[in-house]
Image (tube, rainbow, N blue to C red):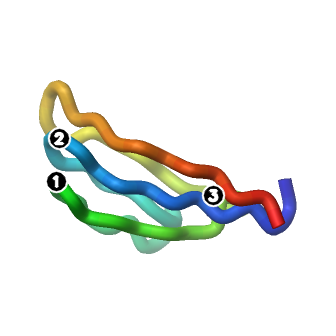
Amino acid sequence: MPGTVEHLVIGVGRALAGPLDEPVELGPGDYLSYPGDAPHVFTALVPDTSGVIVMEHV
């Protein structure tokens, strides 16, 4: 949906997340906000990685 923003907090593990052209490596407790209406990625880098994503529609 146009205008969508995703807010991500990693709980356990490590992940590569964010805009497809500039993903960021995140660990436990890290927070990232990025446009959800553009190509993006969330890739677990270790087994049992988990996080919480809140989608904001403006």
Q: Is residue 23 above or below residue 12?
A: below
Q: Is residue 29 above or below residue 15?
A: below
Tag 1: residue type?
Answer: Pro
Q: Nearer the viewer, mark 1 or mark 3?
A: 1
Residue positioned 55% across, 69% down in the render: 34
**How far across and down, in percent of the image, does residue 47 sit?**
15, 27
Q: Nearer the viewer, residue 32 or 24?
A: 32
**Mark closer to the chain start, 2 or 1:** 2
**How far across and down, in percent of the image, does residue 57 sit?**
78, 58
**Mark closer to the chain start, 1 or 3:** 1
Q: Is residue 13 above or below residue 17?
A: above
Q: Nearer the viewer, residue 39 or 36?
A: 36
Check disc 1 and report the residue beneath it. Answer: 28
Q: Nearer the viewer, mark 3 or mark 2?
A: 2
The tag on residue 12 is 2
Check disc 3 and report the residue beneath it. Answer: 39
Which quarter of the rendered picture does the C terminus lie within?
bottom right
Farthest residue to the top: give it.
48
Residue positioned 18% across, 26% down in the render: 48
The total number of labels drawn is 3
What is the quadrant of residue 22 in the picture?
bottom left
In the image, 36: left or right of 14?
Answer: right
Farthest residue to the bottom: give it.
22
Q: Residues within 10 Å of mark 2 (few under 14, many from 20)?
A: some
**Mark closer to the chain start, 3 or 2:** 2
Q: Residues within 10 Å of mark 3 (few under 14, many from 20)?
A: few
In the image, 27: left or right of 35?
Answer: left
Q: Look at the numbered disc 2 and give the secondary structure of its residue.
A: strand
